[in-house]
Image: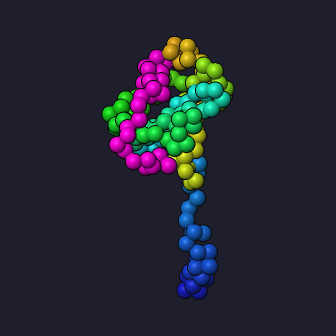
Amino acid sequence: MTRCCIVLAVLLAAAGVAGAQPKFPPPTLQGVMSGDLVGRALIRWSKVVEGERVQISITAGFAERLNPRWAPQPARLNYDLDKNRALEKAVKRAGLGRTNRALSGGEDRTLEVLGRGPSGWEVVGTWSMSRVKWQKKSRQLYEMLEPLFDVPSDTFVPVGGPLR
């Protein structure tokens, strides 16, 4: 018995701490959507403007807009947890159905839900439609996200933070 314990201890020591760590599976859409999106997901809303992807990223009461034509770094938007909770309810109520294609351009808007995986944020769901279809399918969700493309950035918040 003690010989087995010694062999096991030697094997664990040889494998190192990293070898003994459990492997976490990648996130799934069902897993992310079944929980609290505010703390466990990142919502990304995007469009293409003159060949460049402009995107809004929202998580845990923080929102950033990345517009490569304006600045290389994302701009922090004035956003809070109450707005984030309302967005979570709208996403869950939207009845988005199966995921579909990625952003193609023009009048299309893409909604992505990302979950925290072993190597950072991973896309678990993508839905792209024209602006008109978004307004028909989920007007509330569209009206919460679309105006964020035009909101002035919060100049008093330092660049960088939890979305990175």
The residue that appears at 52% across and 31% down in the rendered structure is: 45
| Numbered range of the magenta stretch | 138-164
Q: Given the current orientation, which residue lies at the most extreme bottom position?
A: 3
Q: Establish if 158 lies above or below 126.
A: below
- Residue 148, given in percent of the width and then of the height, sits at 44, 28
The answer to whether residue 8 is seen in the rendering is: no
Q: Quadrant of residue 131?
A: top right
Of residues 139 and 146, which is closer to you in this image? Answer: 146
Q: Is residue 109 magenta?
A: no
Q: Quadrant of residue 3?
A: bottom right
- Residue 87, given in percent of the width and then of the height, sits at 41, 30
Q: Given the current orientation, which residue lies at the most extreme left position?
A: 82
The N terminus appears in which quarter of the rendering? bottom right
The residue that appears at 41% across and 35% down in the rendered structure is: 153
- Residue 74, given in percent of the width and then of the height, sits at 49, 41
The residue that appears at 47% across and 46% down in the rendered structure is: 163
Asked if residue 125 lies left or right of residue 39, the reply is: right
Asked if residue 15 lies left or right of residue 144, the reply is: right
- Residue 54, given in percent of the width and then of the height, sits at 56, 32
The residue that appears at 37% across and 29% down in the rendered structure is: 86
Q: Establish if 113 lies above or below 27.
A: above
Of residues 3 and 143, which is closer to you in this image? Answer: 143
Asked if residue 145 lies left or right of residue 15, the reply is: left
Q: Establish if 25 lies above or below 135.
A: below
Q: Given the current orientation, which residue lies at the most extreme front position?
A: 70
Of residues 151 and 6, which is closer to you in this image? Answer: 151
